[in-house]
Image (spheres, rainbow, N blue to C red):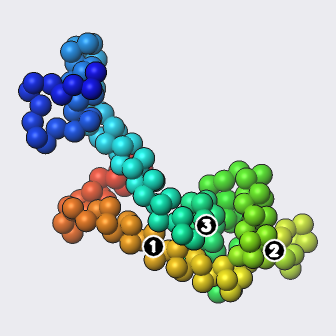
């Protein structure tokens, strides 16, 4: 383990090594899907760490950023129901309530009764929340651009098409 196979090329990566090791230990195991799945998993982990690092100066977790960014991109008055936020951010009801309370305590949003349903409290960005969402979005999308900088425009479009098939 940890040793590069003798037939490895300069282009080989950790996924090639993993597949080579499995081939030597379990020759009939079909590891071909790891060429795609392993690399996507590796990139997701690496990119997730880079995103968290980019959001650190704003004292935002990715979930908190996702919530205020969703509110900001929803347009004026930057207000949504918790249900609409859950659909975009993909959190459970309890986790959403906890996150909204945290963001409200930080002064980034306020909650007010829904005029159509008194049981619902709509989340609305404060001015500070909208400003922070905009600053954090710039940093987040800068990181995203850097993460795919190695791809030409044509390659990026081809990858988008292939990833859409998988999604």
Q: Are marks 1 and 3 in contact (CB under 8 Å)?
A: no
Q: Earlier in the sequence, mark 2 or mark 1?
A: 2
Question: Looking at the picture, how far across and down is residue 74, in whole percent?
Answer: 60, 78
Q: Where is residue 78 in the image (x, y as percent from the top left)?
A: 66, 81
The crowd level at tag 3 (other Cα within 10 Å; few <14, some 14-19, many 20+) is few
Picture residue at 18% right of the left edge, 66% below the top:
152
Q: How far apart are marks 2 and 3 (CA)?
A: 21 Å
Q: Which of the 4 image quarters holds residue 106?
A: bottom right
The residue under label 3 is 59
Measure the C-alpha gap from mark 2 to mark 1. Answer: 27 Å
Residue occupied by mark 1: 139
156 in relation to 6, above or below = below
Q: Do the residues labelled 2 and 1 touch (CB within 8 Å)?
A: no
Left or right of 62, for residue 53? left
Relative placement, left or right, of 167 versus 87 is: left
**Marks 1/3: CA–CA distance:** 13 Å
User: In which quarter of the view is residue 148 placed?
Assistant: bottom left
Q: Does the rendering let one see residue 52?
A: yes
Element on which disc 2 rests: strand
Image quadrant holding the N terminus, namely: top left
For the residue labelled by badge 3, is the local secondary structure a helix, a strand or a loop? loop
Percent across and percent down for residue 65 are 59, 67
Residue, x 57% and y 71% (percent of image)? Answer: 58
N-terminal of the pair, mark 1 or mark 3, is 3
- Extreme right residue here? 118
Which mark lies nearer to you, 2 or 3? 3
In the displayed structure, does residue 97 sit left or right of residue 70?
A: right
Q: Dot 1 surroundings within 10 Å: few (below 14), some, or many (20 or more)?
A: some
**Residue highlighted by disc 2:** 111
Could you tell me residue 145's position as x and y percent? 33, 69
Q: Does dot 1 land on a helix, a strand or a loop?
A: helix
User: Disc 2 or 3, which lies upstream in sequence?
Assistant: 3
């Amino acid at each position: 383990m940890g040793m590069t196979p003798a037939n490895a090329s300069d282009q080989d990566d950790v996924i090639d090594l993993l597949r080579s090791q499995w081939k030597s230990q379990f020759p009939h195991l079909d590891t071909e899907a790891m060429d795609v799945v392993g690399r996507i998993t590796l990139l997701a982990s690496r990119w997730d760490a880079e995103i968290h690092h980019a959001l650190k100066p704003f004292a935002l977790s990715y979930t908190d950023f996702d919530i205020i960014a969703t509110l900001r991109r929803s347009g004026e008055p930057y207000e949504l129901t918790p249900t609409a936020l859950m659909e975009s951010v993909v959190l459970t009801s309890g986790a959403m309530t906890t996150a909204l309370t945290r963001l409200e305590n930080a002064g980034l949003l306020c909650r007010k009764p829904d005029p159509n349903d008194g049981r619902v409290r709509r989340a609305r960005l404060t001015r500070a929340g909208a400003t922070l969402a905009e600053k954090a979005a710039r940093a987040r999308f800068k990181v995203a651009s850097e993460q795919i900088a190695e791809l030409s425009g044509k390659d990026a479009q081809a990858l988008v098409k292939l990833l859409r098939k998988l999604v």
